[in-house]
Amino acid sequence: MAIRISDDLRLGTRTGLPDALRVLVKEYPRTGWEAHAHFTGLVEFWLGRHGMFRQICAALREDAEAEMDGKLDPRMRNQRLSRYGGMLLNELHGHHQIEDHHYFPKLVGLDSRVARGFDILEADHDDMDGLLARFAEHANGVLQGKTETGRFREELLSFEALLDRHLNDEEELIVPVILKNGPQGLH
């Protein structure tokens, strides 16, 4: 069932979380996360996964640009696109399923001030399903010689921007909740 949120809070529209949902990130700013006692373990792992998604997107974009500039053989680009594109799709789908079915239901009740934020994140996951399908379509088009690399790069830039918006908002909502309450019961 799709989560209902207002259009201004949809992933493709918003530029960040509303101030009312940023209350915990103000109490636990990003600059202090690594020094917090609850950082090591779950938070560190979670942020590492997000970093991996960002790195894969950057590598795919750099490969497309290198191929467009004649600095990367299209066959090598195809090998890397197949490997890393498939990894990105599979890992993001799995990551979102674990969040939706395991973590979000446990985290939502820990601080009522940010509970509505979990609806936004779940709606993002619904929106990301469409973005992932479009990414796969364009990547497969490149691999099959039906989509130009430049068109794929443009699609990837859009995908990367929306993914980064989602990851930043998710981090600024979830990490402070875990830092405040601890990771117990979440594993």
Image (tube, helix red, strand yellow):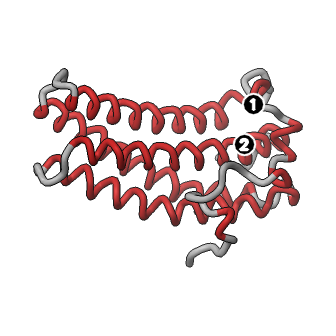
* Residue 42, quarter of picture: top right
Amino acid tagged 1 = Arg
Query: Circle 1 is placed at which residue position?
Result: 30
Q: Residues within 10 Å of mark 2 (few under 14, many from 20)?
A: many
Residue 12: x, y in percent? 56, 58
For mark 1, give the secondary structure: helix
For mark 2, give the secondary structure: helix
Q: Earlier in the sequence, mark 1 or mark 2?
A: 1
Left or right of 90 on screen, residue 3: right
Quadrant of image for the N terminus: bottom right
The mark found on residue 156 in the picture is: none
Residue 26: x, y in percent? 86, 38
Q: Residues within 10 Å of mark 1 (few under 14, many from 20)?
A: few
Question: Would you place residue 41 above or below residue 122 in this image?
Answer: above
The one of 147 and 178 positioned closer to us in this rendering: 147
Residue 178: x, y in percent? 76, 42
Left or right of 55 on screen, residue 32: right
The mark found on residue 172 in the picture is: 2
Amino acid tagged 2 = Glu
Q: Label 1, label 2: how many angstroms apart (C-alpha)?
A: 8 Å
* Residue 119, quarter of picture: bottom right
Residue drawn 22% across and 42% down? Answer: 149
Q: Are marks 1 and 2 in contact (CB under 8 Å)?
A: yes
Question: Would you place residue 52 above or below residue 148 in this image?
Answer: above
The one of 20 and 93 positioned closer to us in this rendering: 20
Residue drawn 35% across and 45% down? Answer: 154
